[in-house]
Image (cartoon, rainbow, N blue to C red):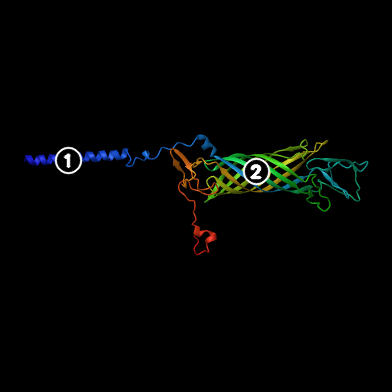
Amino acid sequence: MINLEINRLIKVATFVMLFCCAFQVEGQDQEKPAIPLDHFYAKPDNVSSLRLLLSKLHFGLSTGYGRTFYRQDLSGYSILQQQDSTPLLFSNDVDPTTGNIPRGYRYWFNTVNQSDNVAVDVNNDFLVGSDTSELIFRAPGTSIPLQLTLHVEIQNKYKIGGGFMFEYHRVGEFTSKNFDGSIAAISPNFGSTFYKKYFLILGGKVYRYYDYVLSVDANIGAFNLSNKFDKGLIQKGVFFNIGATIERELSEYFSAFVRPSFDFKNFTLNVPESSTSITTNMNAFYLGVGVFYRIPELKKCLIKSCTTQINHQHGNKQYRSRMHPIWKKQNPHHGENFPKLFKYKKKNRKKLHPY
């Protein structure tokens, strides 16, 4: 009996010891990793706050083509067209005693050329007033813009920033909308000029399809006419531009885009020695093409022979890969330097042995 009790005690003690050992091992497994990785890899330093801030900036450079639709509504005026002469714009009635026009204007676009006491030949001259007909002059304009922008993206969706546009511009002839055959065209007194714009950018991304992103944005700001415009007589307002940006992401730092947009702007020419004015609308369509570039948050790997294709670490510093340029897509978490096999590329489709 004594031996039996001793054997039972030994078994119970053995079970308790095994249970305690298992519990201790399980606790050690939770506290310490099976392989102490911190002995092999240094804890990475955080990226500097300045570099993180700079990585939020998106720089844009674009050019393209612009088409301006000049339009002048000459309500309140009349026009006299004499043979072999430019049209005469005037707001006063014909002098009943002499039959002459006391004051008129031969040119009224970027400045004013005044003519006084113009005689009227009722038998040969063409005379029309805005009280009986619609007097509208129109002219085309062509532009080659160069635009620089800087914006930040909030939550990778909303855009806010600013920009500057320098625009080479040519203005065509002004012709009458309803009396093109009876009223002569008016040519600007300059061949070409330059316009400038300063604007605020507001917009957001509305749709994504793989690497293509559609954004809707607006530019609001001021425009500056050149010295070929008489700025003492001209008053300008703000301009408003709305457009859609179709962006193709070539990498996480670089993308190309196409942006069709439409401009709304005008200026008012105050006629000297008069209380009247002429408003010229300068609405325009633009088709821009360009690129966006974002500063990477990680520095390029300092080891020239390093062929790592992902974001990686040397010592306690993090680096990005040296194996791809900024215009080539590269997932920072896994290498994809050659996402399409060499034998599937278009130039090798008909080859039996493309390698």
Numbered circle sitting on residue 147 = 2
Q: Quadrant of the N terminus?
A: top left
x and y percent of residue 306 in the render?
47, 45
The residue drawn where x is 62% and y is 41% is 149
**Residue type, label 2:** Gln
Q: Nearer the viewer, residue 281 or 247?
A: 247
Position of residue 82 in the picture relative to residue 236 (left or right): right
x and y percent of residue 252 in the render?
52, 46
The mark nearer the N terminus, 1 or 2, is 1
Position of residue 247 in the picture relative to residue 226 (left or right): left
Q: Are the residues at dot 1 and dot 2 in contact (C-beta closer than 8 Å)?
A: no
Q: Which residue is mark 1?
A: 14
- Residue occupying the far left of the picture: 1
- Residue occupying the far front of the picture: 305
**Pointer 2: residues within 10 angstroms few (<14), some, or many (20+)?**
many
x and y percent of residue 128 in the render?
84, 48
**Residue type, label 1:** Thr
